[in-house]
Amino acid sequence: MQKVDGEYADETMRLVIVPTEIPTRETMEAGEEAAETLIEGNTCTVVEDGESMTPESNGSCFELHVGVGDDSEFIIDTTGMTGFAIYAQHSPREFERDKHYLY
């Protein structure tokens, strides 16, 4: 996540990450309702700038907290995953200055 014009779009952003063996559009669409429930719930794990997140097999919600620098980085541990679906609280593109949000 990056500052754009000197500011982050928001100080936090929630993501739901769901490991899947079938990373297709259909799989993502089928999981939207469950992801929305997780994002709107109170079970999101806080992840600070520079920290890692390891999604559980049935999906996990993470609340990313940006740091004070111009760039904040978060690591997704994908060990053992074939693929994954990510659902975001709002568009991650709001946090792009000169790098794609998944680099």
Image (cartoon, grey):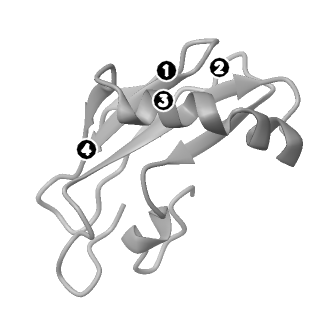
Q: Which mark is residue 54?
A: 1
Q: Nearer the viewer, residue 16 or 83?
A: 16
**Residue at point 22% right, 52% down?**
66
Distance between the Cα atoms at labels 3 and 1?
19 Å
Disc 3 or 2, which lies upstream in sequence?
3
The answer to whether the residues at label 3 and label 1 have Cβ atoms under 8 Å apart is no
Kind of residue at disc 4: Asp
Q: Which mark is residue 37?
A: 3
Q: In the displayed structure, does residue 15 sit left or right of residue 102? A: left
Distance between the Cα atoms at labels 3 and 4?
25 Å
Disc 2 or 1, which lies upstream in sequence?
1
Tell me: residue 93, above or below residue 6: above
x and y percentages locating residue 4 in the rendered image:
29, 80
Q: Which residue is mark 4?
A: 49
**Residue at point 59% right, 27% down?**
34
Q: Which mark is residue 35?
A: none
Q: Which residue is mark 2?
A: 79
User: Element type at marker 1?
Assistant: loop
Kind of residue at disc 3: Thr
